[in-house]
Image (spheres, rainbow, N blue to C red):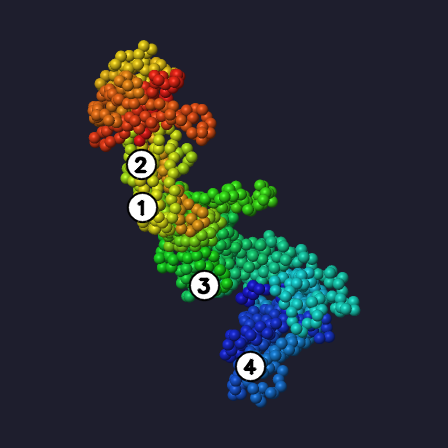
Amino acid sequence: MSVPDYMQCAEDHQTLLVVVQPVGIVSEENFFRIYKRISSVSQINVRDSQRVLYIRYRHHYPPENNEWGDFQTHRKVVGLITVTDCFSAKDWPQTFEKFHVQKEIYGSTLYDSRLFVFGLQGEIAEQPRTDVAFYPNYDECESVEKRIEDFIESLFIVLESKRLDRATDKSGDKIPLLCVPFEKKDFVGLDTDSRHYKKRCQGRMRKHVGDLCLQAGMLQDSLVHYHMSVELLRSVNDFLWLGAALEGLCSASVIYHYPGGTGGKAGVRRLQGTSLPADSGNRHRPGALTTNGINADTSTEIGRAKNCLSPEDIIDKYKEAISYYSKYKNAGVIELEACVKAVRVLAIQKRSMEASEFLQNAVYINLRQLSEEEKIQRYSILSELYELIGFHRKSAFFKRVAAMQCVAPSIAEPGWRACYKLLLETLPGYSLSLDPKDFNKGTHRGWAAVQMRLLHELVYASRRMGNPALSVRHLSFLLQTMLDFLSDQEKKDVTQSLESYTSKCPGTMELISLPDGLNLPPVPFTKLPIVRRVKLLNLPASLQPQKMKSLLGQSMSTKSPFIYSPIIAHNRGEERSKKIDFQWVQGDVCEVQLMVYNPMPFELRVENMGLITSGVEFESLPAALSLPAESGLYPVTLVGVPQSTGQITINGYHTTVFGVFSDCLLDSLPGIKTNGSTVEVIPALPRLQISTSLPRSARTLQPASGDEISTNVSVQLYNGETQQLDIKLENIGSEPLETLEVTSKILATKEKLYGDFLSWKLEETLAQFPLLPGKTATFTVNIKVKLDFSCQENLLQDLNDDGISVSGLPLSSPFRQVVKPRVDSKPANPPEGSKAGDFSHVKTLEAILNFKYSGGPGHVDGFYRNLSLGIHVEAEPSVFFTRVSTLPATSTRQCHLLLDVFNSTEHELTISAKSNEELILHAGECQRMAIQVDKFNFESISESPAERTQFTNHKQLEEERQEARGLEINSKLDIHWNIISFGSVEGILNQLVLEHLQLAPLQWGDPRKEIHFTNAHEHLLSYL
């Protein structure tokens, strides 16, 4: 016997072998339709008996295997069923002749045969015949199953007669010697009358009768005969047949212990069949009790248990039988099949290690020169058996060997599809899944080197199959999942191959369905590049939307009346972890920053990188980048424009790397950090852009409030100078600009400012509103620098109690109470070289001009934007009043005001007062000017009762009073200075002149007699 049956199992020893074959030309579809119906009748309950007959059908069986029918009767073909097409009476004789030719192949062992003829009608078809059945077509053949049952009953009759004939003890007759094919030539010339020869004949015959009893459903009788056979054959060292007797004993014991079968589908096969009664499930065990409680079998349960092997003894006897088989080179197939049967039994007993020993023995059994198909079958069955006992990696190994055998060089037409299918079946054994999500769950499982080899073989097989999309998918999977295990050179080789494949068939995110129903999920390149952090960026400060304060207040909430609820606290925390506390604006470019890393040893080019979003219509603007080799964390900003309002969620990003398009979702990225992924998109707002007539400042203002300044300008002014700032307002957005509010804020400074530093008129600008997209408007701001003009510390250098002459007019002593004297005194007129340096200190003034604007749908929903302009002013000193004195005039209501004026600039300037000629001062020059003025009665400047109530602080009230007096002086004196190259600028005297210009409180003819003393203010007051 040369062709092993790898599907053999122990319970097959009790079956009758029936071959079903086509005769003539029969379509494969029609044949297997009938074959399926025939094979459905796999067991029947024998009439007038509790015995069950089991049938094993084959549509192909090698005739040489039939020669071993005496050795093991389940290998003998006892029934033949042929199927043929015949449509005319003239073809019938030829068809029937073919049937007889087919019977002759198995003629020596056949018990009975049948011929099923389809298509023939008429006189021939109407003739009653037992061995031929006629049917008009394949659809009208309802009696097929019934005829098969009758056929099986006829087989049983022959079987029973043979069993009875062989089992009868005929002491006077000579028992024939049963032989296997290769033994016949060895027994020529032996002494047939010797005792040794007779025991051999008896032992083999007992074994043969045991087989017949097992097939006939008499389990206990078979056990008895097997035991007797073992004793006889062991005594004469007939090892081959002793092994067969032991195997028969094991098979009968397996049938008793495991009624469900060991072949997987055996239990199902035994419980089906229309000819069995309802309780036939118990009848397959001879000796089972009937409904009346009487054992129908001649043997008893006690006897059966005594002769039956225990589960442990079954395996020991299998080992012994196989060891006997191994002594015979020509019994390799028998030995191999015995190993397979033992493995199936051990699998049920869950004794995997012992089963692996049997399989290992089966691997090394040498058979004849097998064909490539037989090798594939052998390795596939070994793989299935290893899988059966839980040796998954070993199973995968033999499955892969079978796959490689499909494309062996000796095969003229390699079966790449079969190879690919077998390779796919090996994946679970190597802990390999084709779903990349399985590789994000903890540590890597399996041997990476073996897995990479298998994936390379899948790529090559799919390419030879002519399926480039499949090759790209497997190669992408290899690169994504095995990246950490690839060497630098392997990374280069794999990427080069991938680029070569994708040049013909780009990689996509579509599901690939295979013909056998397997689906290959897409493979996104989440490691090319690796993303470590995703951060949604707020809009620039000038574009961030602000919500107008509602009348109810910002702290009101309609979600819950409670300040804190422990029930919803957890959910709120989850929402905060994903929801961003800023907003994006419809139609504006929004940014998401990714920190990426290139793990490849070469430059990585990423194309078509953009965002994947949900919830709001979003226009992603793809980007292309090139990351250097092993770059480390590298910031990448992806942008897009939301086209509608609502909540938008950033689900991930898409890339194109090496020709493979990937959708990478944040949920599938391991170890990623994010500040949230959901942000609210509010309705569209206009965008305002400003440009000024002043140059930009290199210094950026940093207010204490933390507000960001979008634009900074700078200007240099002299003290008392006015500069006009022209601002161009342009609507660069897509919505009309409808509202505009302008406010200013002066940053903290040590200098005392007088009056309005920044002033403007908004009415002319608002008259141009609404400002449509692309339109511009102008806005003018006046910058006025008003600082102290006095040089108070120098004034005290010449003060004394006795006063001075005309060159130094007396000053009243109350000034000493206001100004603290300096420790180091300097001369009133320093040397020429140091004059300019003493008064050249530049003072810095900073202010923020804020534009609050809105329009479009965002204005309807109560949103606006802020745009800030930073103004940096460097104020240089212009003129100083170093000394102040007076001379009496001809009238007591008038006086001559004497002022020492110092020019601290580097330019020549002129200074003039009301109704006085201009006084020219060179750079660093100090001169005295005299002004005849009327004295004032400051008591006439009285505050209203409303002002008294407004300023409750006495100090604040006094400051306001002094300011009002300064305004009065300003209108009377009207002092201006002018630099020709810069234009005319006015300047105002120090309020210290109040004492000198105050009208004397005592006058002739005035009935009131009072003396009024006024403390002069210590600060300079100047107005513009």
**Number of the label disc, if any, that sits on residue 782:** 2
Q: Residue at x 50, y 42 (%)?
A: 554
Amino acid on which disc 4 is placed:
Asn
- Residues packed near mark 2 inside 10 Å, few (<14), some (14 to 19) or many (20 plus): some
Query: With 166 as the anchor, is 869 left or right in this view?
Result: left
Residue 81 appears in the figure? yes
**Number of the label disc, if any, that sits on residue 137:** 4
Name above or below for residue 736 compared with residue 783: below
Q: Which residue is mark 1?
A: 777
* Occupied quadrant, residue 340: bottom right
Q: Earlier in the sequence, mark 4 or mark 2?
A: 4
Count of numbered tags: 4
Assess whether mark 2 and mark 1 are in contact (beta carbons under 8 angstroms). no
Q: Secondary structure at mark 3?
A: helix
Q: CA distance from mark 1 to mark 4?
A: 95 Å
Q: Nearer the viewer's eye, disc 4 or disc 2?
A: 2
Q: Quadrant of the C terminus?
A: top left
Image location of residue 953, percent across then percent down: 46, 26
Q: Earlier in the sequence, mark 1 or mark 4?
A: 4
Q: Is residue 532 or residue 794 the one in the foreground?
A: 794
- Residues packed near mark 3 inside 10 Å, few (<14), some (14 to 19) or many (20 plus): some
Q: Quadrant of the N terminus?
A: bottom right
Amino acid on which disc 2 is placed:
Asn
Q: Which residue is mark 3?
A: 417
